[in-house]
């Protein structure tokens, strides 16, 4: 009702009656929102609604598991949970609580998902943990259904397999920057007081002194990622050359139990070496799981970084029945490890496989034994036949000296040759290094690194404030599901340029 408020007269002030107003009812607000939704529905949600049918994506086993008798009816539909978690990642909503806030205040979003009532955060968490295996099944089915799309977009890139690993940082004390900084500061002070030279690396020393796992959960391992120490759940991703995820492995105790052939060595003093060694051990088991789940996917090219430059891996990748009956790659694009270059083939090999002096093939080189590298690869060491061990008069230590009149190397120790059992495969992994073909193809490998960054930053994997393994594992799988739904949507609307991201459509 109109209301006029009168004040005592003030000098120089003109009194104006207050403007009458009408109080809006809840029915009016509801009607206004409803009209807005019907007449101006967000275009992107309409696009999803038109082209993505979750009923076709959700397997019957998942539906039966979700709606199995629990003593009470489900208040929230299965599709509603899935749509909400997919939308969260498409729109890069960083936390579950913020997602619920959007659902609470956005009627179009709430109705699109299928919620009549917004669940609390615990319901979201419980859904991830209880139905982790079912989410994995959804992901695996989407991998198979998107394979023909990838082949249609670019068959040569679709036939590539690229692997890399990373970690999901857990919400633990050890990941507080103050934790590592305190140790590094102490080591710097100690190095200064002891007069250590510049070769001392306090960061490397800190890595060695910090515990190998978080105190809250031994499955949260220490890792060196993106230039910093952190405690993570480690995972591996397999993509094709288009950057579309094909397989996800979560390296927990269940994975290790299913692959007893993996031996976990002790922590070394080098974070980079630890990661490389571990990745080399994880590669074949991860790919075996991938090919076992998807027998119709037959890539012929493998791309990996120098961490996989190990003789045994070339044999596993390029020969035999490693991935099934006669299934292996035709070529492997792996750069040589800087610490293990191929020897120049300017020497001959006798009938026993012993390398000989480059200047005199009749002189076999001296066998100095075999060694096993941290990757598990065996190598044999041979030295120049004219090298002698000489004792230094001052230090009383022995060292090599070459007494060749026509040395084939500038080294005072003489020529040394390392022989790997599968040297030919390492030298010629189905393609020649240093060629334009090699350079152009190997550039594609970086798509897996960009994919990992996309999953972490854009699909809300990073910064999760939890240390629960199942929750983080589910978040990882949901990120993979979201990317593959993006592939399906891009194909349905005939815009394959959006197969990795539909953000331009949202914009």
Image (tube, grey):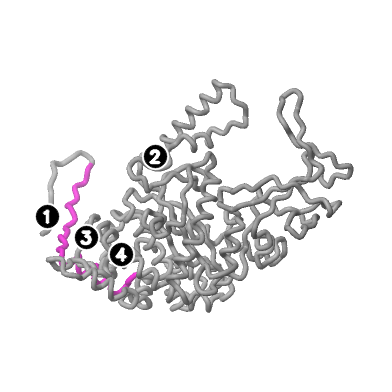
Query: Badge 4 is on which residue?
Result: 84
In the rendered view, would you say 306 is above or below 27?
above
Tell me the quarter of the image containing the C terminus. bottom left
**Which mark is on residue 3?**
1
Counting from the top left corner in percent of width and height, residue 188 is at 52, 28
**10 Å neighbourhood of mark 4: few (<14), some, or many (≥20)?**
many
Of helix, strand and loop, which one carries label 1? loop
Mark 2 vs mark 3: give the one in front: 2
Residue 501 shows in the view: no
In the rendered view, would you say 33 is above or below 261?
below
- Indicate yes or no whether the magenta region holds residue 24: yes
Question: Does the CB distance between marks 2 and 4 fall below 8 Å?
Answer: no
State the residue lying farthest toward the right: 405
Query: Badge 2 is on which residue?
Result: 174
Residue 345 shows in the view: yes
> In whole angstroms, how far apart are the C-alphas of marks 2 and 4?
32 Å
Q: Which residues are magenta?
A: 13-42
Marker count (numbered): 4
Query: Badge 3 is on which residue?
Result: 119
Front in this rendered view, residue 450 or 16: 450
Mark 3 vs mark 1: give the one in front: 3
**279 left or right of 143?**
right
Residue pictured at 49% horizontal, 37% vertical: 208
- Indicate yes or no whether the magenta region holds residue 458: no
Of helix, strand and loop, which one carries label 3? loop
Front in this rendered view, residue 180 or 259: 259
Q: Earlier in the sequence, mark 1 or mark 2?
A: 1
Mark 2 vs mark 4: give the one in front: 2
Q: Earlier in the sequence, mark 4 or mark 3?
A: 4
> In whole angstroms, how far apart are the C-alphas of marks 2 and 3?
32 Å
């Amino acid at each position: 009702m109109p209301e006029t408020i009168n004040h005592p007269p003030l000098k120089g002030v003109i009194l104006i009656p207050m403007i009458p107003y009408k109080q809006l009812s809840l029915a009016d607000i509801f009607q206004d929102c409803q009209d807005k939704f019907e007449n101006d529905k967000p275009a992107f949600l309409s696009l999803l609604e038109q082209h993505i049918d979750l009923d076709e994506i959700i397997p019957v086993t998942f539906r039966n598991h979700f709606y199995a008798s629990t003593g009470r009816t489900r208040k929230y539909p299965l599709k509603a949970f899935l749509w909400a978690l997919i939308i969260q990642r498409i729109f890069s909503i960083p936390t579950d609580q913020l997602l619920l806030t959007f659902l609470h205040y956005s009627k179009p979003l709430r109705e699109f998902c299928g919620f009549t009532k917004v669940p609390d955060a615990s319901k979201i968490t419980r859904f991830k943990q209880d139905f982790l295996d079912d989410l994995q099944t959804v992901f695996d089915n989407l991998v198979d259904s998107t394979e023909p799309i990838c082949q249609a977009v670019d068959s040569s890139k679709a036939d590539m397999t690229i692997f890399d690993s990373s970690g999901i940082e857990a919400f633990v004390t050890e990941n507080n920057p103050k934790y590592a900084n305190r140790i590094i500061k102490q080591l710097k002070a100690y190095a200064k007081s002891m007069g250590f030279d510049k070769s001392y690396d306090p960061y490397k020393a800190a890595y060695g002194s910090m515990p190998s796992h978080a105190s809250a959960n031994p499955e949260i391992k220490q890792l060196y990622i993106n230039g910093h120490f952190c405690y993570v759940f480690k995972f591996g991703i397999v993509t094709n050359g288009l950057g579309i995820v094909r397989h996800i492995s979560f390296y927990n105790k269940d994975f290790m139990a299913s692959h007893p052939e993996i031996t976990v060595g002790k922590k070394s003093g080098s974070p980079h070496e630890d990661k490389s060694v571990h990745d080399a051990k994880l590669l074949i088991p991860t790919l075996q799981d991938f090919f076992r789940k998807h027998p119709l996917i037959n890539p012929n090219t493998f791309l990996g970084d120098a961490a996989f430059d190990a003789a045994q891996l070339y044999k596993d990748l390029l020969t035999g029945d490693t991935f099934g009956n006669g299934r292996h790659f035709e070529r492997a694009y792996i750069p040589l490890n800087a610490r293990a270059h191929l020897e120049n083939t300017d020497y001959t090999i006798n009938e026993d496989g012993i390398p000989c002096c480059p200047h005199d093939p009749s002189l076999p080189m001296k066998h100095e034994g075999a060694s096993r590298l941290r990757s598990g690869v065996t190598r044999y060491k041979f030295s120049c036949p004219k090298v002698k061990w000489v004792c230094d008069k001052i230090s009383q230590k022995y060292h090599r000296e070459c007494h060749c009149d026509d040395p084939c190397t500038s080294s005072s120790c003489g020529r040394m040759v390392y022989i790997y059992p599968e040297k030919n495969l390492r030298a010629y992994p189905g393609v020649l290094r240093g060629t334009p073909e090699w350079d152009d193809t190997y550039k594609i490998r970086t798509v897996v690194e960009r994919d990992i960054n996309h999953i972490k930053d854009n699909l809300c994997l990073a910064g999760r404030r939890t240390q629960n393994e199942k929750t983080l594992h589910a978040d990882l799988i949901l990120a993979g599901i979201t990317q593959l739904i993006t592939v399906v949507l891009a194909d349905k609307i005939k815009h394959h340029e959006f197969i990795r991201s539909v953000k331009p459509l949202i914009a």
